[in-house]
Image: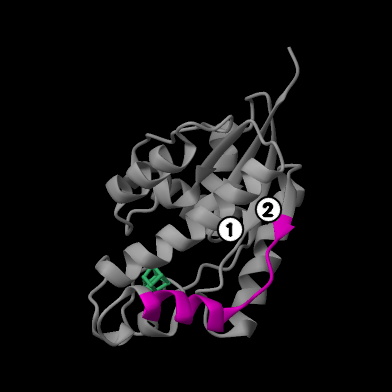
Amino acid sequence: MSKKTFLLQTCCAPCALPILEYLKDKDFYITLYYFNPNIYDEKEFWKRFYEVCTIADIYHCSTILHDYNHKEWLDFLKKNLNSDLEKYVENGERCKGCLYMRLKYSFVYAKDNDFDMFSSTFLTNLYKDTDFVRKTIVNLTKNSNVKFLDLDIDKKEFYKKGIELCKKHNIYRQKFCGCEFSINQNEK
Ligand code: SF4
């Protein structure tokens, strides 16, 4: 049987590392899809992308970079939300909109490029609403040829593993989720 192609929507290297370690003996061609227009500022965007490329080399994965367009991300959220973006609490409606947009664009890439499977680093993140993420992926992948690879694992264990692996490979671990509104929230 031929190897399956798997697209992992990737927010950052610290979240992707334990997933790659977990999947390393499975028979997949893995592509890390980096679509993170939420990140502020652009320098931070490239810093995190550099680390994603580093771990892709370690685990022999491919990497796809989606252009940085922070304005598009802000416009998307402003169009879909009623109040100022900074007024939302962590994991509130702003974050749901942000996660949804990033999952949707990543999934569309997987579908348009005939990947067999799709999943997201959000599913193993201690600080994300994983029920929302799971439901969103189930909805996106239903009626599609791209199958959802659920990463239904112990998030605390993965978080610890992520810290260990970052130390081992000298990977930068950011102190905030990504956008300008999260800079002082110490989400990560
Ligand atoms: S805090 Fe994180 S998930 Fe929430 S809107 Fe900002 S970047 Fe997106």
Secondary element under disc 2, as helix, strand or loop, is: helix
Q: Position of residue 157 (x, y in %)?
A: 37, 42
Foreground of the two, 107 or 4: 107
- Residue for badge 1: 13
Magenta-colored span: 64-79
Q: Position of residue 78 (x, y in %)?
A: 38, 81
- Residue for badge 2: 55
Give the residue at x 33% y 46%. 156
Give the residue at x 51% y 67%. 173
Foreground of the two, 73 or 133: 73
Q: Specify whether residue 72 is painted magenta.
A: yes
Q: Is mark 1 within 8 Å of ligand 1?
A: no
Ligand 1: which quarter? bottom left
Q: Quadrant of residue 65?
A: bottom right
- Location of the N terminus (image quadrant): top right
Report the number of discs: 2
Residue 10 visible in this rendered orientation of the protein: no
Mark 1–mark 2 contact, CB under 8 Å? yes
Amino acid type of the residue that numbered disc 2 sits on in the rendered structure = Ile
Give the residue at x 24% y 68%. 92
Residue 51 relative to residue 176: left or right: right
Q: Position of residue 52 (x, y in %)?
A: 66, 59
